[in-house]
């Protein structure tokens, strides 16, 4: 269920970044802030468990950032 949610957020951010690039930065930062908090909390588990618990949040944060930047980059390449 978490995976479907992250995919939906990435799609929404990519579309938002394509149509209104400046307004897409706020939701992108908010999502990354939330995922960063999850990563920090997961990383407090001892040893190997800390790395395992924080990894999904780190990779999701990377995906959110890359989908937002991809939408803005695609918008910049449009001929109009």
Image (spheres, rainbow, N blue to C red):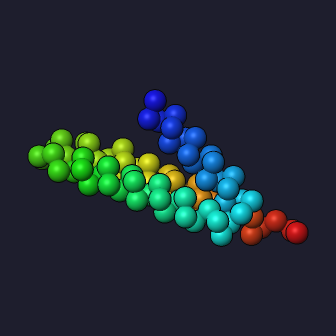
Left or right: 62 as drawn, with respect to 24: left
Q: Nearer the viewer, residue 47 or 44?
A: 44
The answer to whether one can see residue 51 in this image is no
The answer to whether one can see residue 52 in this image is yes
Percent from the top left, x then y, of residue 62? 46, 55
Left or right: 20 as drawn, with respect to 60: right
Check the image and name the residue furthest to the left.
Answer: 46
40 is higher (above) or lower (below) than 8:
below
Q: Residue drawn 51% across and 53% down? A: 64
Q: Nearer the viewer, residue 65 or 9?
A: 9
39 is higher (above) or lower (below) than 8:
below
Q: Residue drawn 57% across and 48% down? A: 10
Left or right: 38 as drawn, with respect to 27: left
Check the image and name the residue furthest to the right.
Answer: 80
Q: Residue drawn 53% across and 59% down? A: 28
State how many labels appear.
0
Q: Residue drawn 18% across and 41% down? A: 49
Residue 22, quarter of the rendered image? bottom right
69 is higher (above) or lower (below) than 50:
below
68 is higher (above) or lower (below) than 43:
below
Residue 56, quarter of the rendered image? top left
Left or right: 46 as drawn, with respect to 56: left
Percent from the top left, x then y, of residue 76? 74, 69
Image quarter in which the C terminus is found: bottom right
Percent from the top left, x then y, of residue 66? 55, 58
């Amino acid at each position: 269920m978490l995976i479907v949610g992250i995919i939906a957020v990435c799609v929404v951010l990519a579309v938002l970044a394509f149509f209104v690039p400046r307004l897409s930065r706020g939701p992108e930062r908010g999502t990354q802030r939330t995922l960063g908090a999850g990563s920090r909390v997961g990383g407090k588990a001892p040893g190997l468990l800390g790395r395992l618990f924080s990894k999904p949040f780190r990779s999701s944060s990377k995906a959110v950032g890359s989908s937002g930047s991809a939408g803005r980059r695609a918008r910049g390449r449009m001929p109009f």
